[in-house]
Amino acid sequence: MEKTWNNKAWFLVLPVLVLVAFSAVIPLMTVVNYSVQDTFGNNEFFWAGTDWFVQTLHSDRFWAALQRNLVFSLIVLALQIPLGIFIALNMPKKGIGVPICLVLMALPLLIPWNVVGTIWQVFGRVDIGLLGHTLEAMGFDYNYVRDPLDAWITIILMDVWHWTSLVVLLCYAGLVSIPDAYYQAAKIDGASRWSVFRYIQLPKMKRVLLIAVLLRFMDSFMIYTEPFVVTGGGPGNSTTFLSIDLVKMAVGQFDLGPAAAMSIIYFLIILLLSWVFYTVMTSSDANA
């Protein structure tokens, strides 16, 4: 029996394709165009080929910003994933506490990124901020404006506060989907809490953990607004990530060619690392 094709269905997909073309494809092609050309204004362009890509890949500034991105992403993943799992495991599964906990977990995710940065900028100030003033009163020499380590601690705490809730909600969704029969069987067998977590809860959370790791890696690797509002990339260049450096190059210096080449390399690095994360986690899931 031959399958009937309904070509009218393409009209339903066409608006989405047009929207994607205007919001993603056309801007991407514009960036590609700038990455292989140079301009001195007046809408005059000169062919540059791969010069900007070579310049970017040989730039110490690019590799230093990339290193800061990788370190930041690894730190927040190492903190947020275990913390999110721990909180999700201790959240109530029944009763009035469930909606209360879910609302509290969702609140940080509803705050705009620039507002989060402003909150922590004030929160960390030593003169009026609760965190900065408290640490100074306790004898700690804390100042995220002049100390690179304090700046890193501040933006890491800010990101953990802002985005751990996403991991919690995803893990909680995986936990509540586990049938009660699994827990009853484990209780009959006398399984310990660690055994229940290792052989029942963790395997059932693997898929949501994959989503959580991928989302949090991509978000943390592309972070811009929060650290820019809090530190502006400083002190010095200690918190200047690739996104901040890219904006400085494109908007501040108006080097459109190098900025376009860096943005494409940045985009490809995110795709590559996300693919690596996905491949490693899915292959380990299949082997298990």
Image (spheres, rainbow, N blue to C red):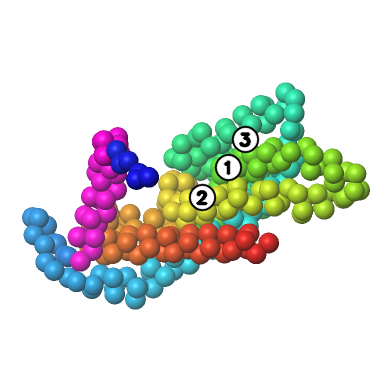
Is 80 placed above or below 44 here? Answer: above
Q: Position of residue 150 (x, y in %)?
A: 57, 55
Q: Which residue is drawn at 9% across and 55% down?
A: 43
Comes first in the chain, label 2 or label 3: 3
Of residues 52 and 254, the one drawn nearer to the viewer in this rendering: 52
Cα separation, mark 1 vs mark 3, equals: 8 Å
Asked whether 23 or 203 is in front, the reply is 203
Q: Which amino acid does label 3 sit on?
A: Met
**Rendered image quadrant of residue 64:** bottom left
Question: Mark 1 to mark 2: distance in Å?
Answer: 9 Å
Q: Mark 1: which amino acid?
A: Leu
Is label 3 in a helix, a strand or a loop? helix
Q: Mark 3 points at which residue?
A: 105
Residue 4 visible in rendering:
yes
* Residue at the image point whose x is 85% and y is 44% from the top: 185
Name the side, left or right, on which 286 lies relative to 19.
right
Residue 73 drawn at (x, y percent) = 53, 58
Tell me residue 119's x, y (percent). Answer: 52, 38
Residue farthest to the front, as pictured: 1
Which residue is found at the position 69% from the left and 37% from the top?
176
* Foreground of the two, 188 or 95: 188
Give the magenta range.
7-36
181 to the left or right of 69: right
